[in-house]
Image (tube, grey):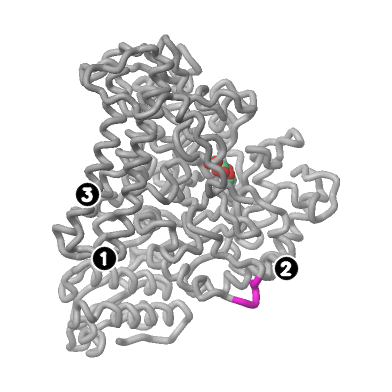
Amino acid sequence: MTTGVTSPSLQAAVAELQRGVAGLSGRRPALSQQIRSGALVLATPASLPETGPLLQDLGATGWLLRSTRLQGRDVTLIAANTDLGLLYGSFAWLRAAQTGADLARLDQRSAPKIGLRLLNHWDNLDRTVERGYAGQSLWDWWKLPDIRDPRYADYARANASLGINGTVLNNVNAKAESMTAPFLAKAAALAEVFRPYGIKVWLSARFSAPMELGGLKTADPLDPAVRAWWQAKANEIYQAIPDFGGFLVKANSEGQPGPQDYGRSHADGANMLADALSPHGGIVLWRAFVYAADASDRAKQAYAEFQPLDGRFAANVIVQVKNGAIDFQPREPFHPLLGAMPGTPLALELQITKEYLGFATHLVYLGPLFQEVLQADTGHGGTVARVVDGRLGGQRLTAMAGVANIGTDRNWCGSQFDQANWYAFGRMAWDPDQPARTVAQEWVAQTFTTRPAARDAVAELMMASREAVVDYMTPLGLHHLMGTGHHHGPAPWVDNLERADWNPVYFHRAGRDGIGFDRSPSGSHAVAQYAPAVARRFADPRTTPPELLLWFHHLPWDHEMPSGRTLWAELITRYDRGVATVDDMRRRWAALQPDIDAERHAEVAAYLAVQAREARWWRDACIAYFQSASGLPLPAGVRPPEYDLAHYKALRFSFAPGRGG
Ligand code: GCW
């Protein structure tokens, strides 16, 4: 192996190659030979000037892998403009090796399409994780900064292998304490571990921190003392963490403090923090997840508050928008803000942890969900991917965020297959146009098997899993039917929560007359928030895709579906299809036994058994409830729910995970 001067990132690259090759060589002895004969060359234009012209379009961190001849020898060139690019290139080479590429004929190049590829941890300082299903928070705040768990470095390695380059350490429901000197020292220790891997540390900022920590009477963003407090705090943070990424802020949402408490706008709040960070090159990620208690249609709120502020944010502010307008449901139409704020950088926020998709116990591969939103045509001249990569609005600042599913579980994510969702997020943040299927195949080849038939069988099982969960939980555009608070299991009957828009009945509106939320011009008219062509399509039930029908329309039970069935019959068919798909996933997994190691095969099989049972529970409870609403008999041949509605309503789930502190 040839290397030049050693920076920490270059050392990390070499260490990864050595470790990776040692691990792989049992399976592919030729690899270690290739390394030992010095045939792998890591080069930047500084160490090997002839690489310069090859790298012109790859930016700072893109990479190139090429089988070529150098100084009379056959070599594999890993080249990039920087050492961090070489680290990414080294991981790309390992990926090629692990997925069975012909290493003597490599010719690959890639550069990230999105600048900031961030994990958002909803981790609390007491190590509980809001919506976390993988054990405790990885961050052992109590023992930091002195004790650095080796998993911090492994976390950084895993992230760097995907190109993830930033991590927000603490929950968006933030505690001011995370910005006190002792906690900044702890965050600085993590930043030091992550730095060689190109990962910057960010923090969620509590808007009222100047009051809680600084003893001020107000957190009004236009108050000079408040502004001075944040400036001093930013200076202190950059003293401790010179390459600090910036702040993520949840303001005026679900009880969090914010600028509206003082009659100021989101732009006033974000710009104040942006001014404090800008001398240091820091960035504000300001979340658009807001909804007021009195909203007639919760789906409309974010657009109503943010779209009029387009162009009013400081240059170092990014508005971070969830993929859909409600909340990380198994299926939502893309958020109407995406594409509607051309004068503002918009980050896409995806949820990797499966708050509304069966927690860690259900096998749901999220690649198809991510792809569906990224490839949605906004009607504003391009897809969501083109909004997020900045090409549509000509933005320089671009970002994609994933709410992490990582914890202290030995498998990191709560289940074997949930690792695939971390993987898919990282790969699709690097290149939002990567097909979910390719990403799944890649992951399977590196995780379970490279035998093509088995690899593809596992990938196809994964690909089917997302539609399955939609079918057995919330088919045809239904949403937010989950249990109160913990969001586990079906509870479409709940109608007594303090806020109307926390109740499932608010979202499905099922009654004798029909089912669905009317967001067409005859209802809340939320469709008007989309670009005209998209709005027209969603306004009419005949042109709304069946998958989103009840998101946009309230329709009679006998409404005729494209299948020729009535809406009532179609709803049941979808619930049945979801259950059948999970049964099929179990059969397919069972058939893969010869290809998968016994321990993981058995573990996944046990999880799938839970999923099959819970899919039936979802189907039965929802059909029992919707039948009580419709008053209709079950169509001929339909299996009746196992229990009556009262049984499902009486179920309770004490200590369900993920509630946080
Ligand atoms: O999805 C909802 C969750 C909350 C979360 C909130 C948010 C961090 O139920 O637990 O709070 O969204 O995204 O801010």
Asked if residue 300 shows in the view, the reply is no
Residues in magenta? 143-147
Image coordinates for residue 114, horizontal then vertical, percent: 42, 54
The residues bearing labels 1 and 3 have C-alpha atoms spaced at a distance of 21 Å
Q: Earlier in the sequence, mark 1 or mark 3?
A: 3
The mark nearer the N terminus, 2 or 3, is 2
Q: Which mark is residue 252?
A: none
**Which mark is in front, 2 or 1?**
1
At x 42%, y 51%, the residue is: 360
| Label 3 CB less than 8 angstroms from ligand 1 | no
Residue type, mark 3 in image: Glu
Label 2: state its secondary structure: helix
**Residue 404: x and y, percent?**
48, 54
Q: Position of residue 578 (x, y in %)?
A: 29, 35
State the separation of the CA atoms marked 2 and 3: 48 Å
Q: Identify the secondary structure beneath mark 1.
A: helix
Compared to 306, does 2 lie above or below?
A: below
Q: Main secondary structure of the magenta part?
A: loop
Quarter of the image for residue 517 reads top left
Residue that mark 2 sits on: 182
Instruction: Give the quarter the ligand 1 occupies.
Output: top right
Q: Which residue corresponds to mark 1?
A: 598
Q: Residues within 10 Å of mark 2 (few under 14, many from 20)?
A: some
Question: Can you tell which of label 1 and label 3 is closer to the viewer?
Answer: 1
**Dot 3 surroundings within 10 Å: few (below 14), some, or many (20 or more)?**
some
Give the CA distance from mark 2 to mark 1. Answer: 46 Å
Whether residues under marks 2 and 1 lie with C-beta atoms below 8 angstroms apart, the answer is no
Q: Position of residue 220 (x, y in %)?
A: 77, 42
Give the residue displayed 45% in from the left and 22% down from the top.
Answer: 508
Q: Is residue 445 magenta?
A: no
Which residue lies under the disc numbered 3?
Answer: 460
Residue positioned 69% across, 53% down in the render = 175
